[in-house]
């Protein structure tokens, strides 16, 4: 017996592997500071939890439509219309269990074997994994530290060919915390005008965790709504990772195809989770403001501390809750240093190569942890790097 050959093309998300290794060390009595997993360390706000509890008591414990409850789709449409400055209809939305199905379903719906998909590198590893699994050709778009973790539009334009079927954008970005500039975004839109068969998947899951200015979406640019699939959700903004709920927004013909995939894959998302999501979108937003303020405080602490370590330099990210420091000055490879920090310093982080080949020379730290723990991690890292 053996697995299908296509399974050999499937990658993984290293954060969960490192988390498992860190938990195993903790089980042996080791103290570990977790800076590997991209999960807010805050509880889901009380008003959202209460809405979920009430929904269970009200009977929202049964199947719902594959694309989402009508009232939840309406709330998503109104929220995206307001935050992106466009008009979105409920039938142009879909609710799914987390953000990843939007990636997977978009690729399954659009990509034929050999179709080219441009994706950010370093970038979220599931992009490349799912492109390969779907039979597409993964075309990496270099994300440059020298450009404040943006990409060069000229490089992007050279990657476009008649075979380009999808372009994946991620702003704000994982793992760098980078934000695409308006100039880059506009140039991408102009370049794609020459390739009418190419769609855009815009991953904006960190859209509310921005420290300077306001979030911008390519969805808002003229002519882009008809060819863009927006990925967003509840895990990061409202600390709802365990609720498993995300959403996609796109042209109705594609949303309908994704709903059919939903029927075949998971039937529907939990009804009571969707009622809680409506409260997240429409209720008080003070918890989001407070969380982002605390993340900014932690960002400043970790950036200052990393820049004080021997052989390490770190740019200040503009969004999300990650830093992506350059460790080439240490003379060590990313994987070897990440392993040493876990085993010798008790600090769990990810090698930059977890996010693509162009991540070599970097590490990723999630600062979704307390200032106290971040400072403990920095002190422990200094001992290892000073040896």
Image (cartoon, helix red, strand yellow):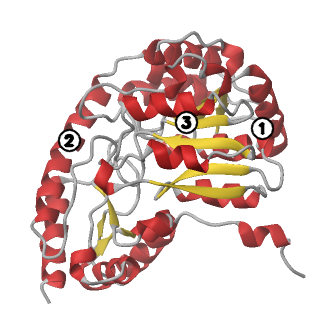
Q: Residues within 10 Å of mark 3 (few under 14, many from 20)?
A: many
Q: Residues within 10 Å of mark 2 (few under 14, many from 20)?
A: some
The quarter holding residue 66 reads top right
For mark 3, what is the residue?
202
**Which residue is labeled 2 in the image?**
296
Disc 2 versus disc 1: nearer the observer: 2
Is 7 situated above or below 322? Answer: below
Label 1 sits on residue: 262
Task: Give the Cα separation between the discs numbered 1 and 3.
Answer: 20 Å
In the rendered image, is residue 207 in sight? no
Q: Which residue is located at x 47 percent, y 38 percent?
A: 205
Residue placed farthest to the right in the image?
1
Q: Nearer the viewer, residue 276 or 8?
A: 8
**Label 2 secondary element:** helix
Q: Look at discs 1 and 3 and give the one toward the viewer.
A: 3
**Mark 1 vs 3: CB contact within 8 A:** no
Is 36 situated left or right of 82 in this image? left
Q: Residue at x 32, y 56 (%)?
A: 145
Rendered view: 333 above or below 85: below
């Amino acid at each position: 017996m053996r697995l299908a050959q296509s399974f050999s093309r499937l990658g993984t998300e290293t954060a969960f592997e490192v988390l498992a290794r860190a938990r195993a060390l903790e089980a042996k009595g080791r103290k570990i500071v977790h800076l590997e997993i991209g999960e807010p360390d805050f509880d889901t706000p009380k008003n959202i939890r209460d809405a979920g509890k009430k929904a269970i008591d009200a009977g929202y414990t049964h199947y719902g439509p594959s694309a989402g409850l009508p009232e939840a789709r309406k709330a998503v449409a109104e929220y995206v219309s307001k935050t992106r400055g466009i008009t979105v209809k409920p039938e142009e939305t879909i609710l799914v269990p987390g953000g990843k199905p939007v990636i997977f379903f978009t690729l399954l719906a659009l990509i034929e074997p050999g179709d080219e998909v441009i994706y950010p590198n370093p970038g979220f590893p599931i992009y490349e994994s799912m492109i390969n699994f779907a039979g597409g050709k993964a075309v990496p778009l270099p994300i440059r530290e020298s450009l404040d973790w943006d990409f060069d539009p000229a490089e992007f334009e050279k990657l476009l060919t008649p075979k380009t079927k999808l372009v994946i954008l991620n702003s704000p970005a994982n793992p760098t915390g980078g934000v695409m500039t308006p100039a880059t975004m506009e140039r991408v839109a102009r370049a794609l005008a020459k390739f009418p068969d190419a769609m855009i998947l815009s991953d904006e899951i960190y859209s509310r965790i921005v420290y300077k200015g306001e979030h911008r979406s390519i969805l808002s640019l003229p002519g882009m709504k008809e060819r863009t699939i927006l990925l967003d959700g509840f895990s990061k903004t409202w600390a709802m990772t365990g609720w498993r709920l995300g959403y996609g927004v796109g042209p109705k013909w594609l949303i309908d195809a994704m709903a059919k995939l939903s029927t075949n894959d998971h039937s529907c998302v939990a009804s009571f989770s969707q009622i809680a999501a409506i409260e997240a979108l429409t209720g008080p937003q003070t918890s989001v403001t407070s969380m982002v303020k605390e993340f900014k405080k932690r960002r400043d602490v970790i950036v200052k501390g990393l820049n004080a370590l021997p052989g390490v330099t770190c740019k200040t990210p503009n969004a999300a809750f990650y830093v992506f420091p350059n460790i080439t000055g240490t003379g060590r490879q990313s994987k070897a240093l990440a392993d040493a920090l876990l085993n010798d310093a008790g600090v769990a982080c990810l090698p930059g190569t977890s996010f693509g080949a162009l991540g070599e020379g970097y590490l990723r730290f999630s600062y979704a942890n307390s200032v106290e723990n971040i400072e403990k991690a920095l002190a422990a890292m200094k001992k290892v790097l000073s040896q």
